[in-house]
Image (tube, rainbow, N blue to C red):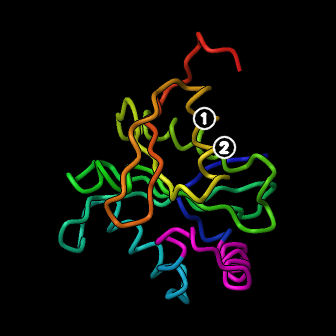
Amino acid sequence: MLKLILPEEKYWQSFQEGLLEYKKSPSPYDIQGIKKAFAYERFADYKRDCEDMRNGKNLPSGHVPNTYLWLIYNEKFIGLYDIRHSLTEYLKICGGHIAYSTIPSARRNGFAAQGLKLCCKYAHDKLNLKDVLISCNAANIASYKTMKKVMAAFGGLEDKPTTVDNPEEKRVWIKTEPDNTVIV
């Protein structure tokens, strides 16, 4: 069974195993949430910082509240989703609302798209977002295909690429509720 949850201690060991996979097979597309997670040795510290970020406490200058969610499949951590609750002017052109990453051993199985759909539902139900902006490095073809697949299921539109931080970023706006008029 696949589920997207707030971090829970019962999955901490599995999360740590996932981080080891990221370390053994790093990708230039690993999200910041993965890179930050390497610093934590105890779940309590990680959870506290996640809660602070979610509640907008102790944020670095220019940052917005965000929620980290874990993608769990058959009681095992397989991915991290990071939802920004709002967008700054910078995030509107580079970054967007949602960043995500799947552990290397779970890639190419459709989990990223399923998790992104669950993330859109979370953004709708918990954050009252009607649509979300998602971007990826133009060279990250797998992520681009994932974004387009979810956009086809939920509705939305592709925005102009941007080159703010040098590499071109593909950008899509996705509605946070499935578009029942679209047949997928």
81 lies left or right of 25 = left
Say above or below: 94 vs 47: above
Judge from the rendering whether residue 38 lies leftward or rightward of residue 45; answer left or right.
Answer: right
Q: What's drawn in magenta, residue-wise?
A: 12-34
> How many numbered circles does the render carry?
2
The residue labelled by disc 2 is 113
Q: Residue at x 46, y 34 (%)?
A: 158
Q: Quadrant of residue 164?
A: bottom left
Q: Amino acid at mark 2?
A: Ala
- Residue at (34% x, 56% y) in the render: 94
Tell me whether the residue at label 2 lies in contact with that at label 1, contact meaning CB atoms closer than 8 angstroms: yes
> Magenta stretch containing residue 179, yes or no?
no
> Residue 89 in the image: x percent, y percent?
20, 52
| Whether residue 152 is situated above or below residue 136 in the rendered picture | above
Mark 2 residue element: helix
Q: Residues within 10 Å of mark 2 (few under 14, many from 20)?
A: some
